[in-house]
Amino acid sequence: MAAKEIQKIPINYNYFLSGVIYRKIGIGDEDLASELHKSRSFKFFTFSRILAEERRIEGDTMLIKNARFLLSSPREEIVKAFIEGILSEPAVKVASARFEVMSVEVKKKPALSSPQAFKTLSPIVVRTVREQFGKMRTWELYPKDGDFYTHLKANLLKKYEAFYGKEAEDLFEIIKIYAVKPVRIDLKGIKHRASLMHFCVEASRELLNFAYDAGLGEKNAMGFGMVETAPHAANK
């Protein structure tokens, strides 16, 4: 996404970027976009944070120029519709900032093998339900919470079963954490606890590939849980 001048966008831009993606999918395939909007289940796509050539934070805004982001999905029709939408209408509006899409690249999927090291391209959200003051409430977990890994795996298995209509081999374990950065992302006034991570996972090939395509954790279609392959590293 290019612009002649530096553009200003909200630092919490996930909602706006998600809207861009839905609009472009709608241009490419209106029925598919309608299906995704109406679905109360998993959307089966995720996207990265905005990666910019020039980037500066000023209060609750971010100044960027010549930016890009990545989209991933195990559903080929989602990626196809998005690309068709971008090519048909290359102008992109994120909040009040306008960009022009200069190029679209389809990246070749890397060969994944266990144990596999990943880095997050967008932070991971993992949630559970806990009792507080006599009421059950949704609670978002960080990797320091023991339940984080249990719920991360359970969510991935549930997504896999919903997508393929069958159970996956029950092997997905994060065996090393190289780095964690907790973040808070505001979505329409609600702040979500999430984690940027560099980690190593031991998993079945089917779950490795599905996690790479669909994303890890929850709220993937709002820009959470996208990963890329990364080098193994010594624990710090």
Image (cartoon, rainbow, N blue to C red):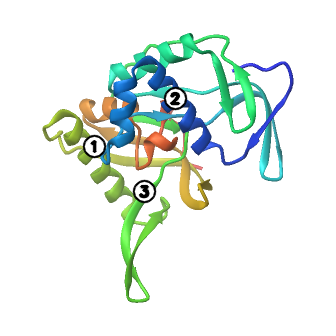
Q: Position of residue 5 (x, y in %)?
A: 86, 24
- The residue under the point 18% across, 39% down is 168
Disc 2 target residue: 23
Q: Secondary structure at mark 3?
A: strand
Where residue 197 sits in the image (x, y, percent)?
Answer: 54, 46
The span from disc 1 to disc 2 (Cα, nearest Å) is 24 Å
As drawn, the label of residue 46 is none
What residue is shown at x 49% (from left), y 64% (from top)? Answer: 144
Callout 2 amino acid: Arg
Q: Residue at the spot x=14%, y=41% of the render?
A: 167
Q: How many marks?
A: 3
Amino acid on which disc 1 is placed: Lys
Crowd around label 1: few <14 · some 14–19 · many ≥20 (10 Å): many
Q: Report the front residue among 147 and 218.
A: 218
Q: Are marks 3 and 1 in contact (CB under 8 Å)?
A: no
Element class at badge 2:
helix
User: Residue, x 32% and y 25% (percent of image)?
Assistant: 75
Q: Position of residue 100 (x, y in %)?
A: 70, 17
In the displayed image of the protein, which residue is found farthest to the left?
166
On the rendered image, what quadrant is the N terminus found in? top right
Q: Which residue is mark 3?
A: 126
- Nearest to viewer (mark 1 / mark 2): 2
Tell me if I can see residue 3 in this picture: yes
Above-or-below relation of 194 to 55: below
Q: Earlier in the sequence, mark 3 or mark 1?
A: 3
Give x and y (percent) for residue 205.
26, 30
Residue on which the image places disc 1: 159
